[in-house]
Image (cartoon, helix red, strand yellow):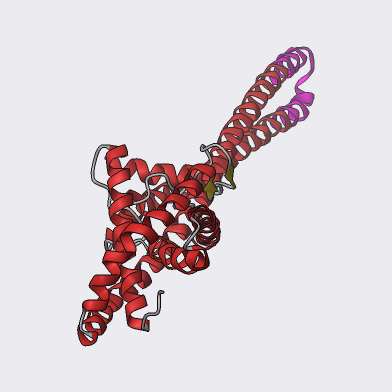
Amino acid sequence: MYIYTWYQWLLFFFIYCFIGWIIESTYVSLKCGHFVNRGFLRLPLLPLYGSGAIIMLWISLPFQDNLFLVFLSGMIGASALEYVTGWTMERLFKMKYWDYTNNPFNINGYICLGTSIAWGFLTIVLTEFIHRPVETVVLDLNPIVCIVLCGIIGALFVADTVESTKEALDLGRVLESMTKMKAELEEIQVQMALLKAETADKLSDLRDEQIQRAANLKGEAAVKITTLKAETAMRTEETINALKESAERGLEAASLFKETAGKAVPDLSSLSERLQSLTENRDKLSKHLGFYRKGLLRGNPTASSRQFGEALKELKERLKN
């Protein structure tokens, strides 16, 4: 059983990728209330199902006479594939393209008991009912036709996989950049608030100091004037010099006040410019969603990200607008 040529195995892989896409897209579309082109690729193919079907066929081969062992082997083999695939994709693309975290008895959100049991039953359905008619169709095909089909579908599959992988990597970098920019925006906003508060305190202190100095100067001037009236004309020059010295002290204090108050302006201006620049760049990143990136987000509505969850949520919200 299962003695096929390489191109027949490849055609089986593509057929089960397509069947998996039908199953997943139908289920998710009904759940979401609108059509969802499910999966990582833009083609109607889900490689996880194709790979899972091939693994199910191979693993269950020694247990064809025992449905329980077929169920158990398929459940374990497909679950292991799903876990490894999910773990690898998250490390590469910074996202979980499916997430069972909210499902009971899950392992790191990559697999859960419910889907594992479903894989087991699907293995029985595959080996007992689905594969036999599919096998008949493929084996009846002319070898040349089979090879041509594999070549055409394979070329489209590889091109789609390369482009989807590239866009998924870029999307991961976008999420990382958006998260870093948001952190920097928040830091700048805190710095601006602190700087404004500090400037206000300094201006208040300087104002109080100048009021006090002005009062002191006024008192000194009054004393000098009284002294002028009492003293002789010979002391006039000395008194005038003292008044000049008091006036210079007032000018020096006013200059210090102006210099201190002016230091905060360039800092606030620089921070404001940086804040505006970061905001504009972040908006550009979140708005620039091409065909593949939109497809990745729409085709995986349950996708999540532990590191960049807020950025991912923001991109999903933009898709709705």
Camera-side residue: 169 or 49? 49
Instruction: Tell me: 25 left or right of 75.
Output: left
At x 32% / y 38%, what residue is drawn? 31
Is residue 199 shown above or below 100? above
Q: On the image, which quarter does residue 124 sit in? A: bottom left
Is residue 230 shown above or below 208? above
Measuring from the top left, give residue 121's x and y in whole percent.
Answer: 43, 50
How many marks the image carries: the answer is 0
Measuring from the top left, give residue 4's x and y in whole percent.
Answer: 37, 80
Camera-side residue: 22 or 126? 126
Measuring from the top left, give residue 119's x and y in whole percent.
Answer: 46, 52
Can I make out residue 290 in this image? no
The quadrant of the rendering that contains the N terminus is: bottom left
Main secondary structure of the magenta stretch: helix
Furthest residue in direction bottom, as rendered: 144
Can I make out residue 190 in this image? yes
Instruction: Tell me: 192 left or right of 146.
Output: right
Measuring from the top left, give residue 44's x and y in whole percent.
Answer: 27, 61
The quadrant of the rendering that contains the C terminus is: top left
Is residue 1 shown above or below 169? below
The magenta region covers 217-244
Is residue 67 shown above or below 320? below
At x 64% / y 32%, what residue is drawn? 198
Q: On the image, which quarter does residue 200 sit in? A: top right
At x 35% / y 40%, what residue is drawn? 317
Instruction: Tell me: 116 left or right of 41.
Output: right
Residue 149 inside the magenta-drawn segment: no
Residue 224 inside the magenta-drawn segment: yes
